[in-house]
Image (cartoon, helix red, strand yellow):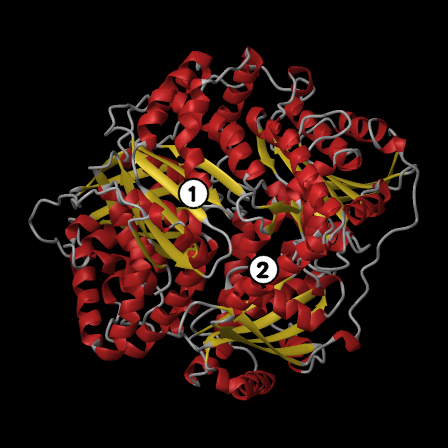
Amino acid sequence: MHGFLLKDKEVISDIHGEGYLFEHLKSGARLIYIKAKDDNKVFSISFKTPPEDDCGTPHILEHSVLCGSRKYASKDPFNELAKGSLNTFLNALTYADKTMYPIASCNEEDFHNLMDVYLDAVFYPNIYTKKEIFMQEGWRYIVNEETGQLDITGVVYNEMKGALSDPESLLQGAISRNLFGKTTYGFESGGDPASIPDLTYEAFLAFHKKYYHPSNSYIYLYGDMDIDRCLAHIGDGYLNDFMRTIDLPEIPETKGNNLQTSSKETYPTDSDEEKGYFAYSVNVGLCTDEELTMALQVLSYVLLETNASVIKTALMEAKICDDVEGWFDSSTFEMLFSIVAKNADLSKVSEFEKTINKTLEGILRDGLDQELLSSSLRRLSFLLKEEDYGSTPKGLIYGMKLMKSWLHGKNPFFCLRHFETLEKLKNPNYDWISLVENHILHNEKKNILVFSPDRDKEKEIQRAFLQKMQDKKASFTEEDMMQIKEDTRKLEIFQHTEDSPEILEQIPILQLSQINPAPSIPVYTKSRVGEGKQIFVPMQSNGIIYLKLHFDVDSLNEELLPYAGLLTDVLGKLDTKKYSYQQLPMVTNKVFGGLSFQNDVYSENTENYTGFLTLKSKFLKEDIAEVAELTKDILLNTNFDALDSLKKIIRGAKIKGENYLLNYSHLEAIHFSVGQLSNGGKVNEITSGIDYFHFLVNIDKLLSQKPEIVIENLKKTAECLFTQKSFYISLGCEEDDLDKAIELRDYIYKNLEPGRDRKLENFSFDKNPSSIGFTANSTVQYNIFSADYRKLGYKYTGKMQVLRTILNLEYLWNEVRVKGGAYGSGCSFQQNGISYFYSYRDPKVTETYEIYKELWKKIGNFNATDREMTKYILGTINRLDQPKTNAERLNDAINKEYRDFPEDFEIMERNQIIHTTKNDILEFSDLLRDISKVKNYCTIGGEGKIIANKDYFDSIQKLIP
């Protein structure tokens, strides 16, 4: 069949599919097809790309091949596809040892269009004729025209400066370096900013020539498709142009002489905190052993991820650290298992190792806690059955799983027989003891790492970089400097030259007639429960019930409002009347497939909102009686007087909160900025945002000084919230299971107190747009600007979503990312009147804000052909039409109900989108001009950069106090 030989065929009942393994005889390419009744078709082509240093060559190449190719000469086919396709997934992914190029679509023509662009990109990229691509996506020298100072920029360079700026990302790299040495997994495949400039253009091209050959490729297809057409497209269209090569990369196992048994490293910080991290890390075996992989996944959870976990308990009771996590990475050939102690007393490294070894020896003697093991296996079984992977198609998840074996020459289908493997682990005679003994305790491939904070390190790094730039500039001849300026000039011409209509038309697009004119409308029924509401979403859920219990935060006063955030951190973890701190996670895993608490805010406009503390759960229908009892116990019988447990939980929450702030700075800055404009946004900020984190830091201190204040306020908050008056419920399940869910609802409701007889009213806050800079230990920035367009006299229309597509994928992409060097940027126009603009891992501050301010001029000169407008509309519709999981369908119904959308909102919005014209976009120039006059900025970034732009901000403060 089109040059392919079928080598194997297997039924894979666990995923309700059939697997076909092919080999392309001429080129040596491998291909797997998973036949399944799923319209969400997936294609991926992957290459084994082991890094040979820290220059980030695989990562830079991943970006670069998608910047134009033989058939598709556009500077950015990837972005063009994002504008005008119906993709359900479109990305490229760099791993430690491979690079993947996956796409997905439910539309067959669109699927082939996407597949063709990707195939042409990886085999025939324009990188050989346009060095500017390497300079843009990788790195380049730039010269400050005013100061003459030499500097470095580039998209991947700036991305990795951001990615490697928080301590835990740096810790992951340090663990790999010390355990694997100068081998594949000891190098940073994404690129270390200190080493990225060592990559030459010639070495970059050589890497592509060496690894991007069909003989080194792994092609994956999944779904309900015409497989003959696909094989013809891939084989006849591409693979037949190549001859097989035997020069293929091998990834050998690490030898003992690469291993550092104990290590010390430091990381930069701007905190006065003297505590750091310990890591007990082991090379636990090969990912091609699916049974070992799943067993270690379970073992990591049992030993480290719950309050009942013995290693976590032992380390915390010994006061070695404030929190413990297990890090298990099975994506690499040699798998990594780490026991990570956070906020560790750095004088206790010997005690850290001894405590772990002693605890593991105790397991060899006494065995694992069978109740915790059983509940952990049950939890894993639920997750495998549910298959909720969020926005990622499940077919792609299957492809990622099978790459573990396939990349290293083993049976790829075995990785998809997860229920078969799970049954082995459920066997009462399974040998967990040998697993602990041989793969962890007595494993000689082990490293103990002390990772210490250093307040001077970032300044030293900056001084060393400036000195390196000065030395580099001093070593340059006049011709060298002229060449840098000439390269910069050529790059600017490359970036500013628009693709011609003929080039853009090389990329195929669908017609508007090919999209479904009817929108996806949340299907749900609503009814009253006391003074609150019930939302029910019927769904095919395979016996799973999705339940959300909501409690109205307007039942609190302003003093107690942040304690609603604190409750979400402690409920379900803290002791209850029936269960201790250690027992609760075991019982929870037996009963629930998932249980968590969160604060949700749904804003109709900047004045009116609905705010909840939400219990979010999912469970099997046969467990509903146990769910009811445990839910009541957690809501009504949590023991807030359990001070020792409370302190541990708060310390852990503070550590996780700090890590979240540093890893998702753009989201936190957006929430803060919106909180300056909106009552609902401010409630969200106080219960979940930067304001809440600062509150959490103070609570941690208060628990050591006056714990009775915290305990009393938690009790008051719970008493005010968990009442019939504050009660709302949302649930999704099979219609046949609704009666059982109603019984649960009634049981919870009747056990609640009635609540105070008063009208619940929204909080009202002063809304004062202002500009604030938060300093953090970061070498990049996150720049946010937001405004209330309703206050400026404008109303929401679906045409704003087309404007968003144009701004995100034309102007912000080109100005902030391509020319400015940021890793990402975007904007949003919400129905409640809020609009915001953001940049992500951005080397700049003022320049980005100036781009936001000038957008109205760009739109004022907007000119698009009918074809281009069709493309923008397709891209917009695609964003709205993504396949939804059951959990997402429930969320959509809740969102519609509590944001008070009109009944026909989706129909009206879709109609406005489909009929958007060029003139409609031009008319948004006034909107953007008026928005640009609002001074409501929020930047999170490096202290030096923020201080250098201090005139832009009304105030500057530390992100992490």
In the drawing, does residue 359 fall left or right of residue 892?
right
Q: Earlier in the sequence, mark 2 or mark 1?
A: 2
Name which quarter of the figure residue 88 lies in: top right
Q: Secondary structure at mark 1?
A: helix
Q: Is residue 97 left or right of residue 324?
A: right
Image point 91% across, 50% down: which residue?
247
User: In which quadrant will I find the C terminus?
Assistant: bottom left
Nearer to us of marks 2 and 1 is 2
Residue situated in front as seen by the camera: 878 or 124: 124
Q: Amino acid at mark 2?
A: Leu
> Disc 2 and disc 1: Cα gap in Å?
21 Å
Residue 825 makes an appearance in the image: yes
Of residue 910 and residue 634, the one placed in the foreground of this image is 910
Locate residue 462, reporting x and y percent: 55, 62
Numbered badge on residue 846: 1
Compared with 346, 589 (above or below) is: above
What residue appears at the point 52 percent right and 65 percent down from the top-left corner? 168
How dense is the environment of label 2, judged by Cα within 10 Å: few (below 14), some, or many (20 and up)? some
For this orientation, the residue located farthest to the left is: 757
Please give the residue where the numbered disc 2 appears in the rendered image.
466
Residue 258 disc label: none
> SS for tag 2?
helix
Farthest residue to the front: give it.
478
Q: In the figure, 115 relative to 347: above or below?
A: above
> Who's the residue at 74% across and 60% down the image?
53
For residue 46, side relative to residue 655 (left or right): right
Q: Amino acid at mark 1?
A: Thr
Q: Position of residue 699 (x, y in %)?
A: 27, 69
Where's residue 951, x and y in %? Answer: 34, 48
Q: Quadrant of the N terminus?
A: top right
